[in-house]
Amino acid sequence: MAIINQAAKELQVKIVYYGPALGGKTTNLVQVHEHVQVAAQSKGKLVSLATNSDRTLFFDFLPIEAMTIRGFRTKFQLYTVPGQVIYNTTRQLVLRGVDGIVFVADSQYEKMPENVESFQNMVDNLSSLKLNLVEIPYVLQYNKRDLPNVAPVEYMEFLLNNRDVQVPSFGATAHKCEGVFEALNMITRLLLHKFVNQTQIAPQAA
Ligand SMILES: Nc1nc2c(ncn2[C@@H]2O[C@H](COP(=O)(O)OP(=O)(O)OP(=O)(O)O)[C@@H](O)[C@H]2O)c(=O)[nH]1
Ligand SMILES: [Mg+2]
Protein backbone atom coordinates (compact mmCIF):
# COMPACT_ATOMS: atom_id res chain seq x y z
CA MET A 1 0.00 0.00 0.00
CA ALA A 2 1.20 3.47 -0.76
CA ILE A 3 2.32 5.41 2.28
CA ILE A 4 0.50 8.70 2.48
CA ASN A 5 1.90 11.03 5.07
CA GLN A 6 -0.53 13.91 5.43
CA ALA A 7 1.66 15.76 7.93
CA ALA A 8 4.81 15.63 5.82
CA LYS A 9 2.75 15.98 2.62
CA GLU A 10 4.40 13.00 1.11
CA LEU A 11 3.19 10.11 -1.05
CA GLN A 12 5.39 7.03 -1.28
CA VAL A 13 4.65 4.47 -3.97
CA LYS A 14 6.24 1.05 -4.52
CA ILE A 15 6.70 -0.26 -8.05
CA VAL A 16 8.03 -3.79 -8.62
CA TYR A 17 9.65 -5.00 -11.82
CA TYR A 18 8.67 -8.66 -12.18
CA GLY A 19 9.42 -11.25 -14.83
CA PRO A 20 11.49 -14.26 -15.86
CA ALA A 21 15.20 -14.60 -15.20
CA LEU A 22 17.44 -12.58 -17.53
CA GLY A 23 14.44 -10.75 -18.99
CA GLY A 24 15.96 -7.34 -18.31
CA LYS A 25 14.50 -6.11 -15.01
CA THR A 26 17.80 -4.96 -13.55
CA THR A 27 18.67 -3.35 -16.88
CA ASN A 28 15.50 -1.26 -16.66
CA LEU A 29 16.53 0.14 -13.29
CA VAL A 30 20.08 0.80 -14.45
CA GLN A 31 18.72 2.78 -17.40
CA VAL A 32 16.24 4.70 -15.28
CA HIS A 33 19.03 5.56 -12.88
CA GLU A 34 21.28 6.76 -15.71
CA HIS A 35 18.72 8.78 -17.60
CA VAL A 36 16.13 10.00 -15.15
CA GLN A 37 15.68 13.74 -15.32
CA VAL A 38 15.27 14.91 -11.80
CA ALA A 39 16.99 17.40 -9.61
CA ALA A 40 20.35 15.93 -8.65
CA GLN A 41 19.57 15.85 -4.97
CA SER A 42 16.40 13.83 -5.46
CA LYS A 43 18.05 11.09 -7.50
CA GLY A 44 18.66 8.18 -5.20
CA LYS A 45 21.37 5.57 -5.32
CA LEU A 46 20.77 2.33 -7.18
CA VAL A 47 21.27 -0.49 -4.75
CA SER A 48 21.84 -3.87 -6.38
CA LEU A 49 22.26 -7.11 -4.55
CA ALA A 50 23.56 -9.35 -7.30
CA THR A 51 25.75 -12.38 -7.63
CA ASN A 52 29.08 -11.91 -9.37
CA SER A 53 27.50 -13.12 -12.60
CA ASP A 54 25.08 -10.19 -12.41
CA ARG A 55 22.05 -12.28 -11.56
CA THR A 56 19.87 -10.58 -9.01
CA LEU A 57 20.18 -12.40 -5.73
CA PHE A 58 17.74 -10.46 -3.64
CA PHE A 59 16.53 -7.29 -5.33
CA ASP A 60 17.55 -3.98 -6.84
CA PHE A 61 16.24 -0.79 -5.34
CA LEU A 62 16.07 2.71 -6.78
CA PRO A 63 14.29 5.58 -5.05
CA ILE A 64 13.15 8.51 -7.17
CA GLU A 65 11.55 11.67 -5.98
CA ALA A 66 9.39 12.63 -8.87
CA MET A 67 6.98 15.47 -8.64
CA THR A 68 4.66 17.38 -6.45
CA ILE A 69 0.98 16.84 -6.99
CA ARG A 70 -1.60 18.75 -5.02
CA GLY A 71 1.11 19.80 -2.64
CA PHE A 72 2.31 16.25 -2.05
CA ARG A 73 5.88 15.24 -2.78
CA THR A 74 5.77 11.95 -4.62
CA LYS A 75 8.42 9.35 -4.07
CA PHE A 76 8.64 6.25 -6.21
CA GLN A 77 10.51 3.25 -4.95
CA LEU A 78 11.48 0.92 -7.77
CA TYR A 79 12.32 -2.68 -6.95
CA THR A 80 13.20 -5.72 -9.03
CA VAL A 81 12.65 -9.29 -8.00
CA PRO A 82 15.15 -12.06 -8.72
CA GLY A 83 13.80 -13.94 -11.73
CA GLN A 84 15.46 -17.28 -11.10
CA VAL A 85 12.83 -19.84 -10.15
CA ILE A 86 14.55 -20.88 -6.90
CA TYR A 87 14.22 -17.44 -5.32
CA ASN A 88 10.48 -17.49 -4.88
CA THR A 89 10.49 -16.63 -1.19
CA THR A 90 12.41 -13.49 -2.01
CA ARG A 91 9.94 -12.59 -4.73
CA GLN A 92 7.12 -12.86 -2.23
CA LEU A 93 8.99 -10.60 0.19
CA VAL A 94 9.69 -7.97 -2.44
CA LEU A 95 6.04 -7.99 -3.51
CA ARG A 96 4.87 -7.03 -0.03
CA GLY A 97 3.29 -3.60 -0.10
CA VAL A 98 3.45 -3.38 -3.90
CA ASP A 99 1.40 -0.61 -5.53
CA GLY A 100 2.16 -1.18 -9.20
CA ILE A 101 4.00 -3.67 -11.38
CA VAL A 102 6.02 -3.56 -14.59
CA PHE A 103 6.08 -7.11 -15.94
CA VAL A 104 9.23 -7.47 -18.05
CA ALA A 105 8.81 -10.30 -20.53
CA ASP A 106 11.61 -11.68 -22.69
CA SER A 107 10.58 -11.45 -26.35
CA GLN A 108 12.68 -14.38 -27.54
CA TYR A 109 10.45 -17.14 -28.87
CA GLU A 110 11.92 -19.85 -26.69
CA LYS A 111 11.24 -17.76 -23.58
CA MET A 112 7.46 -17.79 -23.97
CA PRO A 113 6.93 -20.69 -21.54
CA GLU A 114 9.09 -18.88 -18.96
CA ASN A 115 7.15 -15.66 -19.48
CA VAL A 116 3.84 -17.39 -18.94
CA GLU A 117 5.18 -19.30 -15.94
CA SER A 118 6.56 -16.15 -14.38
CA PHE A 119 3.30 -14.28 -14.92
CA GLN A 120 1.38 -17.10 -13.23
CA ASN A 121 3.95 -17.16 -10.43
CA MET A 122 3.29 -13.44 -9.93
CA VAL A 123 -0.46 -14.02 -9.72
CA ASP A 124 0.10 -16.85 -7.22
CA ASN A 125 2.49 -14.82 -5.09
CA LEU A 126 0.10 -11.89 -5.04
CA SER A 127 -2.71 -14.15 -3.96
CA SER A 128 -0.56 -15.56 -1.14
CA LEU A 129 -0.35 -11.93 0.02
CA LYS A 130 -4.13 -11.65 -0.35
CA LEU A 131 -3.69 -9.38 -3.34
CA ASN A 132 -5.48 -9.65 -6.64
CA LEU A 133 -4.00 -8.47 -9.91
CA VAL A 134 -7.36 -6.92 -10.76
CA GLU A 135 -6.74 -4.31 -8.06
CA ILE A 136 -3.10 -3.63 -8.86
CA PRO A 137 -2.16 -1.39 -11.76
CA TYR A 138 0.39 -3.05 -14.01
CA VAL A 139 1.89 -2.73 -17.46
CA LEU A 140 3.64 -5.20 -19.72
CA GLN A 141 7.02 -4.61 -21.28
CA TYR A 142 8.07 -6.89 -24.15
CA ASN A 143 11.82 -6.56 -23.89
CA LYS A 144 14.73 -7.54 -26.14
CA ARG A 145 12.97 -6.50 -29.34
CA ASP A 146 16.44 -6.01 -30.88
CA LEU A 147 17.11 -9.74 -31.02
CA PRO A 148 16.48 -11.71 -34.24
CA ASN A 149 14.40 -14.51 -32.74
CA VAL A 150 11.57 -12.53 -31.17
CA ALA A 151 7.93 -13.54 -31.07
CA PRO A 152 5.43 -11.16 -32.70
CA VAL A 153 3.93 -8.65 -30.30
CA GLU A 154 0.45 -9.96 -31.16
CA TYR A 155 1.45 -13.41 -29.95
CA MET A 156 2.84 -12.01 -26.70
CA GLU A 157 -0.36 -10.06 -26.22
CA PHE A 158 -2.31 -13.28 -26.73
CA LEU A 159 -0.19 -15.06 -24.13
CA LEU A 160 0.21 -12.34 -21.51
CA ASN A 161 -2.40 -9.66 -22.06
CA ASN A 162 -5.43 -11.91 -22.21
CA ARG A 163 -7.27 -11.04 -19.02
CA ASP A 164 -10.68 -9.37 -18.86
CA VAL A 165 -9.13 -5.92 -18.91
CA GLN A 166 -6.19 -5.43 -21.25
CA VAL A 167 -3.35 -3.34 -19.88
CA PRO A 168 -0.88 -1.02 -21.64
CA SER A 169 2.04 -2.87 -23.20
CA PHE A 170 5.32 -1.66 -24.64
CA GLY A 171 7.98 -3.13 -26.86
CA ALA A 172 11.42 -2.41 -25.45
CA THR A 173 15.14 -2.73 -25.85
CA ALA A 174 16.06 -1.98 -22.30
CA HIS A 175 19.83 -1.78 -22.59
CA LYS A 176 19.35 0.98 -25.18
CA CYS A 177 16.77 2.64 -22.96
CA GLU A 178 14.02 2.07 -25.51
CA GLY A 179 10.64 1.40 -23.95
CA VAL A 180 11.99 1.90 -20.44
CA PHE A 181 10.52 5.31 -19.65
CA GLU A 182 7.41 4.57 -21.68
CA ALA A 183 6.59 1.72 -19.30
CA LEU A 184 7.65 3.62 -16.19
CA ASN A 185 5.72 6.74 -17.13
CA MET A 186 2.59 4.72 -17.78
CA ILE A 187 2.68 2.83 -14.50
CA THR A 188 3.32 6.04 -12.53
CA ARG A 189 0.45 7.69 -14.38
CA LEU A 190 -1.90 4.83 -13.56
CA LEU A 191 -0.80 4.91 -9.92
CA LEU A 192 -1.10 8.64 -9.48
CA HIS A 193 -4.50 8.57 -11.11
CA LYS A 194 -5.58 5.86 -8.70
CA PHE A 195 -4.31 7.61 -5.60
CA VAL A 196 -5.47 11.09 -6.47
CA ASN A 197 -8.97 9.83 -7.23
CA GLN A 198 -9.42 7.11 -4.65
CA THR A 199 -7.49 8.05 -1.58
CA GLN A 200 -7.61 10.62 1.10
CA ILE A 201 -5.17 13.03 -0.52
CA ALA A 202 -6.79 16.28 0.34
CA PRO A 203 -6.86 18.89 -2.39
CA GLN A 204 -4.28 21.58 -1.89
CA ALA A 205 -5.54 24.53 0.11
CA ALA A 206 -6.32 27.40 -2.20
N1 LIG B 1 19.86 -7.94 -26.54
C1 LIG B 1 19.32 -7.45 -25.43
N2 LIG B 1 19.85 -7.75 -24.24
C2 LIG B 1 19.27 -7.22 -23.12
C3 LIG B 1 18.15 -6.36 -23.19
N3 LIG B 1 17.80 -6.01 -21.93
C4 LIG B 1 18.67 -6.63 -21.12
N4 LIG B 1 19.57 -7.37 -21.84
C5 LIG B 1 20.65 -8.22 -21.33
O1 LIG B 1 20.08 -9.39 -20.76
C6 LIG B 1 20.87 -9.83 -19.66
C7 LIG B 1 20.00 -9.97 -18.42
O2 LIG B 1 19.52 -8.70 -18.04
P1 LIG B 1 19.15 -8.37 -16.51
O3 LIG B 1 18.65 -6.98 -16.50
O4 LIG B 1 20.28 -8.71 -15.60
O5 LIG B 1 17.96 -9.42 -16.29
P2 LIG B 1 17.10 -9.66 -14.98
O6 LIG B 1 15.68 -9.74 -15.42
O7 LIG B 1 17.42 -8.63 -13.94
O8 LIG B 1 17.62 -11.10 -14.52
P3 LIG B 1 17.53 -11.76 -13.04
O9 LIG B 1 18.13 -10.80 -12.09
O10 LIG B 1 18.29 -13.05 -13.12
O11 LIG B 1 16.08 -12.00 -12.78
C8 LIG B 1 21.98 -8.80 -19.49
O12 LIG B 1 23.12 -9.30 -20.14
C9 LIG B 1 21.44 -7.57 -20.21
O13 LIG B 1 22.45 -6.75 -20.72
C10 LIG B 1 17.61 -6.04 -24.49
O14 LIG B 1 16.64 -5.30 -24.65
N5 LIG B 1 18.23 -6.63 -25.55
MG1 LIG C 1 18.11 -8.76 -12.06
Image (cartoon, grey):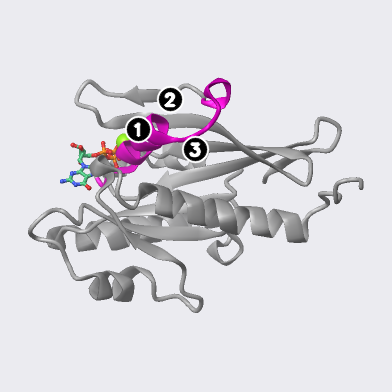
User: Ligand 1 quadrant?
Assistant: top left
Q: Would residue 131 be seen by someone viewing this image from the given angle?
A: no
Q: Is mark 2 within 8 Å of ligand 2?
A: no
Residue position for label 1: 30
Q: What is the residue that sits farthest to the right in this orientation?
A: 206
Which residue: 55% across, 27% down?
39
On the image, the x and y values in percent for residue 178 come to 29, 49
Inter-mark Cα distance, 3 to 2: 9 Å
The crowding category of the residue bearing disc 1, from other C-alpha atoms within 10 Å (few below 14, some 14 to 19, many at least 20), is some
Inter-mark Cα distance, 1 to 2: 7 Å
Q: In this image, 198 relative to 147: left or right?
A: right
Q: Is residue 171 magenta?
A: no
Which residue: 84% across, 38% down?
6
On the image, the x and y values in percent for residue 52 come to 22, 20
State which tag comes first along the sequence, 3 or 2: 2
Residue type at the position of mark 3: Leu
Residue position for label 2: 46
**Circle 3 SS class:** strand
In this orientation, which residue lies closer to the viewer: 114 or 108?
108
- Which region is colored magenta? 23-43
Q: In this image, 192 relative to 39: left or right?
A: right
Residue position for label 3: 78
The crowding category of the residue bearing disc 2, from other C-alpha atoms within 10 Å (few below 14, some 14 to 19, many at least 20), is some
State which tag comes first along the sequence, 1 or 3: 1
State which tag comes first along the sequence, 1 or 2: 1
In this orientation, which residue lies closer to the viewer: 10 or 161?
10
Q: Is residue 42 magenta?
A: yes
Residue type at the position of mark 2: Leu
**Circle 2 SS class:** loop
Q: How many marks?
A: 3
